[in-house]
Amino acid sequence: MKRLTLLILLALAATTAAAQDKYPAKPIKVVLPFGPGSATDIVMRIVGEQMRPILGQPVVIENKPGAFGILAIEEMARSKPDGYTLQIGNPGTNVLTPIIYKKKFKIDYEKEVILVTRLSEIPIVLGATTKDFPPKTFAEFIAYAKANPGKVRYASVGVGSNNHYDTEAFAQWAGIVLTHLPNKGGGAAITNDLVTGDAHIALLNAASSLGVVKGGQVRALAVMSDQRLPEYPDVPTLKELGYSNSKGLWSALYAPAATPRDVLEVVRQAAVQALGSEQVTTAFKQQMIRAVPNASFEDAQTWNKAELAYWKKVTDEVKVELPD
């Protein structure tokens, strides 16, 4: 009888272990720190749809904007570390926020959050209004800003955002003084600031701003990309112009740090496979998005460490007045 009981217990344990090993067995939630329609939202919906058949489970997006991304990050980090709650973020939410708003977190970000893989990169355009703003080229813009210190207004998606720091770092390199006009309405709102002439320049999503550039309401002065863009063939890169810190807007997938490594690897491989699919390639091309997954889990950690170091250096060198 004892032997029979032992065999039954062993069989139950094996069945339970097998059930636990079968990941994923239910839908996976991805918490997103922005509203619907944002660049990060678009990326996750495109990639998530192609991860569904690979994983055999739906990838459900929960939009949770607010508090510089902290709300979304903390929901993910406090969830059960079983691979069923992930988070997608960008340089602003998952690098800058943990650096400049570290005291606002109720978690230890560096210990409780881990990068699964980078997903994509979107090129950025340095755009200028064509409404009552004379400069037509990058060189003319720099000369105009130097001749009119503090009179050139630039828009960003908010104080402490990555494009706020990016623009200030650029201005510091160029030796110009600009006036900041924060706008919490997102990328569409700062594009509108240029169209109306409320702002003179801004860093814009290259894809979503293409229409107003072709329409003549915004002039592209330079692009933040490794190479010139086919859609902007006559527009130089900032790297060509001597600015070495030129970076695009990336998105990446995160998980609670205590998530088992084998589960993280299933997620990573599904994301990489989805990024290589014809459907994602086609959809990304229409949005001028590049798929840039990390080569391995270890590569992801190395890249993340370098990205944190880069933005830490930027925040140390570029002083901005942050909200309490």
Image (spheres, grey):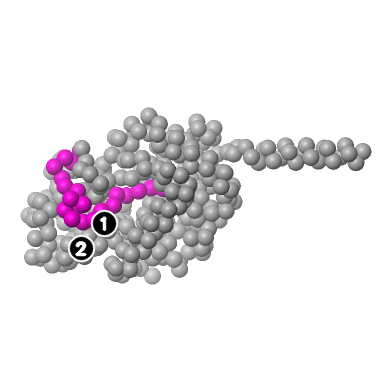
Res 310 visible: yes
**Residue 80 place in picture, x, y as percent:** 59, 51
Whole-percent x, y for residue 7 in the image: 83, 37
Q: Which mark is residue 178?
A: none
Quarter of image, res 314: bottom left
Residue 140 is one of the magenta-drawn residues: no
Where's the N terminus, which quadrant?
A: top right
Q: Residue at x 51, y 41 (%)?
A: 267
Q: Secondary structure at mark 2?
A: helix
Q: Which residues are magenta?
A: 231-254
Q: Quadrant of residue 290?
A: top left
Q: Amino acid at mark 1?
A: Asn
Could you tell me which quadrant the C terminus lies in? bottom left
Answer whether residue 239 is magenta in the image.
yes
Residue drawn at 40 percent across, 34 percent down:
276
Front position in the image: 73 or 253: 253
Q: In the image, 116: left or right of 192?
A: right
- In the rendered picture of this protein, how many numbered marks are placed on residues? 2
Asked whether the beta carbons under mark 2 and mark 1 sit within 8 Å of each other, the answer is yes
Few, some or many residues within 10 Å of mark 2 (<14, 14–19, 20+)? few
| Amino acid type of the residue tagged 2 in the rendering | Trp
79 vs 274: above or below: below
Q: Main secondary structure of the magenta part?
A: loop
Q: Along the line of sight, which residue is nearer the eye, 312 or 187?
A: 312
Return the residue at label 2.
Answer: 173
Q: In the drawing, what numbered circle is on residue 245? A: 1
Q: Position of residue 37 (x, y in %)?
A: 35, 43
Residue at the image point whose x is 79% and y is 40% from the top: 10
